[in-house]
Amino acid sequence: MQDRQEVKNILAGQDSRYLIIVGPCSAWPKPAVLNYAEKLLELNEQIKSALKIVMRVYIQKTAHH
């Protein structure tokens, strides 16, 4: 919930940080995506006073008939 509020505040101009949206193009393979997320979390902790990093992941669901 805190992350969502921080993003809302940035978009509303109530938080002076820049919002950075990054991510892999897909959520596969899972171990690689989790590793990427952990690295982003570490980076976000180091730069959180100036930037807010949000990871965006594209998940394509397929129907099996």
Image (cartoon, rainbow, N blue to C red):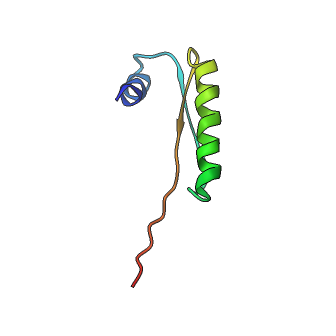
Say above or below: 39 vs 31. Answer: above
* Residue at 58% in and 17% down: 50
Q: Nearer the viewer, residue 51 or 43?
A: 43
**Quadrant holding the N terminus:** top left
Say above or below: 61 vs 21. Answer: below
* Residue at 59% in and 21% down: 45
- The spot of residue 27 in percent (x, y) is 56, 56
Q: Nearer the viewer, residue 18 or 63?
A: 63
Whether residue 3 sits left or right of residue 37 in the image: it is left
All told, the count of numbered labels is 0
The reply to whether residue 24 is in sight is: no
* Residue at 39% in and 22% down: 9
Quarter assignment of residue 62: bottom left
Say above or below: 38 vs 59. Answer: above
The reply to whether residue 60 is in sight is: yes
* Residue at 59% in and 40% down: 37
The residue furthest bottom is 65
**Quadrant holding the C terminus:** bottom left
- The spot of residue 4 in percent (x, y) is 38, 31
Say above or below: 47 vs 3. Answer: above
